[in-house]
Amino acid sequence: MLWPLASKAQQQTDTLRIETSAICGMCKNRLETELGYLPGIKSVGVDLNSKVATVIYKPKKLGADAIRAKISALGYRADSIPADSKAFEQLPACCQAEGLHHP
């Protein structure tokens, strides 16, 4: 049986750069892993020096606001969206250093 090839529109991806409050390797790992579980995510990379998460995703499956909301729900700031307070309190102590994540 032959399967139809996906159209170019179905294959399209966008790149989103989100300023986060990630400060350590645990933050980086948590964000990259958890965002990777979202449908439509192709890749995630967090640069701790710039505190920017670069996300390549399929916009037909997932929107930029949903990605930012997930970052907030994990306890981190996502651009102008503050970190969820309860999620922030659940982060390891090193990830809460100096309250850098907290809204």
Image (tube, helix red, strand yellow):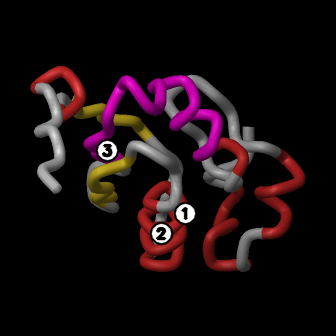
User: Residue 34, which numbered label?
Assistant: 1
Instruction: Work out whether mark 3 precedes mark 1 in sequence or the reverse, and give the earlier one.
Output: 1
Q: Position of residue 65 (x, y in %)?
A: 54, 24
In the picture, the quarter occupied by the N terminus is bottom left
Residue at 78% across / 43% down in the picture?
Answer: 84
Under circle 3, the secondary element is strand
Verify whether residue 58 appears in magenta.
Answer: yes
> What numbered label is drawn on residue 33?
2
Is disc 3 surrounded by few (<14), some (14 to 19) or many (20+) residues within 10 Å? many
Please say if the residues under marks 3 and 2 sit with CB atoms less than 8 Å apart: no
Q: Is residue 59 left or right of residue 29?
A: left
Disc 1 + disc 2, Cβ < 8 Å: yes
The vertical placement of 97 against 44, above or below, is below
Q: Is residue 30 above or below residue 59?
A: below
- For residue 55, the mark is 3
Is 30 placed left or right of 55 in the picture? right
Residues packed near mark 1 inside 10 Å, few (<14), some (14 to 19) or many (20 plus): few
The part of the image, by quadrant, that contains residue 9 is top left
Residue segment shown in magenta: 52-71
Residue 98: x %, y % from top left:
67, 62
Q: Using residue 48 as the reference point, say whether residue 12 is left or right of it.
A: left
Contact, mark 3 vs mark 1 (Cβ under 8 Å):
no
In this view, 25 is above or below 53:
below
Q: Residue at x 47, y 31 (%)?
A: 62
Residue at 15 percent of width and 39 percent of height: 4
Left or right relative to 81: residue 39 = left
Count residues near mark 2 (Cα–Cα under 10 Å), then give few for <14, some for 14-19, many for 20+: some
